[in-house]
Amino acid sequence: MSRSLVLYSQKQDDFAFAAEVASVAGLSLRRVATLEEAVAPLAAQEGPVLFIDLASQEVLSALEQALQSTVGLFSDLVNGNSFHFISDEDFEETPWLAESPLMGAFILRNYKDPQAAGKRYGRLISASLQERAFGLKGLLGPQAQVQTVRLARSIQKIEAVEAVRGYVVAAGFNNRMASSIANAVDEILMNAIFDAPVDAVGKQEKAAVPRTEDFVLDGRSLVELEIGFDGQTVGISAVDHFGSIDKSKILRHMSKVYSVENYKVKSSSAGAGIGLSSVFQGGASFFYVCEAGVRTEAMIFFSLSESYREFREQFRFLATQFYF
């Protein structure tokens, strides 16, 4: 039996979006009217991908109840990676979703063109159905050429960020957009260089190290930067070889709105995700893929836009795939 994409939504834009996702990912599409129908394939062990219209916190509670009465909320049949929540409200306006064990992906319903958005997201779903969803190239269009840079020293982060800025300007992004993208790359590289390294008991090794310090990146500490452009979307990823990212922590940070005072971070908590929250709210899409103790890939995506306002208001998502 082929796997299915189950859509719980009565909105026509969601249906058009989901239909394109299913087509790209090679899934059958099933639209349901109740949450009980949505979770029924789990009991049949069909491993569906679930798209849920998250109209309110009550919908999430009802979904949890439906799961509890069907297979059990904490059953092995319930995989948080399979739940994709579609919302009119931004992620920081739904902090209760960040705390849910069902949070696998958040999709902001600003499709502009549901089919174009579905094509982009369909590639993510297709990757998530593989044994491991690592690899930037599969998330971009087939014509994309992906380049890889390996950072051998921490100070090379500066050069890498400026190289990305030049790359996206050449791709057609204006200087203001390029600065936003460069800031995003700086954040994910800082996380890979300073926050990811942990010792044998999981203690961060470089969390308190000044971000300007120069040191060698070798062995597991080697960091890779990938960048690609398919003519419409630029994708950048930072790869570390520790697989130490904490899903609940990153989701809590991404769901917060930070004031100016919040940005005055002590060195002991530097790189805690505050900058990434601002990047996400400013137009970026994120896909975090992590195999615990092995590898983390933080991928960010930006669509080419005619104006900075359109750039900030583009279709975006926050998705995760965690393997243990």
Image (cartoon, grey):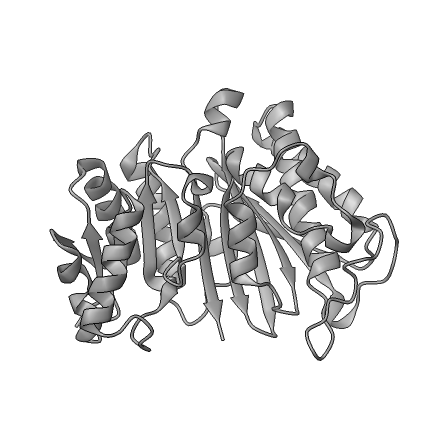
Which residue is painted at 22% across and 74% down in the image? 71
Q: Quadrant of residue 196?
A: bottom right
- Residue extending farthest right: 214
Quadrant the N terminus occupies: bottom left
Q: Can residue 244 be seen by looking at this rendering?
A: yes
Residue 142 in view (yes/no)? no
Q: Is residue 199 above or below residue 67?
A: below
- The residue drawn where x is 45% and y is 53% is 98
The percent position of residue 324, horizontal first and vertical second, equals: 49, 75
| 26 lies left or right of 154 | left
284 displayed left or right of 215: left
Q: Viewed as shown, does residue 105 lie left or right of 35?
A: right
Indicate the position of residue 232 as horizontal and vertical percent values.
Answer: 46, 35
In the image: residue 78, left or right of residue 159: left
Q: Residue at x 19, y 74 (%)?
A: 43
Camera-side residue: 65 or 25? 65
Residue 25: give x, y in percent of width and height: 30, 56
Viewer-proximal residue, 228 or 219? Answer: 219
Q: Where residue 127 sits: x, y (%)?
A: 40, 60
